[in-house]
Amino acid sequence: MTDLTHVDDLVEQQDRGADLTITHPVTGEKMPDVVLTIAGPDSATARRSRIQFSDELMAFRHRPPAEELERIEIERLARLVVGWRVTREGKPVEFSFTNVVRLLTSAQFIREQVEAFSQKRDAYFMRTL
């Protein structure tokens, strides 16, 4: 990275996202039928998601009830998922915000992996080298 052109390229690359193959929470085995494309931490997508998250917290004066806080956090993460390759019983599951929210709500281990992956830059920097 040598000048602002590279920074701009990196932000655009992060908006396109990087693939996260979910791993089984006990065995650590890759689950090739659950691959989420996650926008990077420097992306415009992530910025918009952080702003909306803050706006929603402000609506509760930074003190939402626990259930609302969980919903707000799940929706913040769901906005970072810009695509997916997910199947159920061998058939593709339609990509939509609602379906991403359902997945993140039903599987804490997936939510944890999305959170961790969305904060790391290596998946995005390595693609631009």
Image: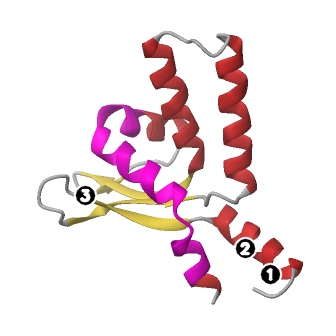
Q: Which residue is mark 2?
A: 10
Q: Residue at x 79, y 74 (%)?
A: 7
Q: Residue at x 47, y 67 (%)?
A: 19
Q: Which residue is mark 3?
A: 90
Asked if the stretch drawn in magenta spans residue 65, the answer is no
Q: Secondary structure at mark 2?
A: helix
Q: How is the image coloured?
A: secondary structure
Discs 1, 2 touching: Cβ within 8 Å? yes
Q: Residue at x 25, y 58 (%)?
A: 90
The C terminus lies in quadrant: bottom right
Q: Nearer the viewer, mark 1 or mark 3?
A: 1
The N terminus lies in quadrant: bottom right
Tell which of 91 and 10 is nearer to you. 10
In the image, residue 103 lies at what x, y percent? 37, 39
Asked if the stretch drawn in magenta spans residue 124, the answer is yes
Dot 3 alpha-carbon crowd within 10 angstroms: few under 14, some 14 to 19, many 20 or more: few
Q: Which disc is residue 6 wearing?
A: 1
Dot 1 alpha-carbon crowd within 10 angstroms: few under 14, some 14 to 19, many 20 or more: few
Q: How far apart, in angstroms, are the residues tagged by discs 1 and 3? A: 40 Å
Magenta highlight range: 102-126
Q: How far apart, in angstroms, are the residues tagged by discs 2 and 3? A: 35 Å
Q: Residue at x 30, y 38 (%)?
A: 108
Q: Amino acid at mark 3?
A: Gly
As displayed, is residue 54 above or below residue 24? above
In the image, residue 69 lies at what x, y percent? 50, 20
Q: Amino acid at mark 2?
A: Leu
Left or right of 8: which side holds 50?
A: left
Left or right of 44: which side holds 28?
A: left
Q: Nearer the viewer, mark 2 or mark 3?
A: 2
Q: Amino acid at mark 1?
A: His
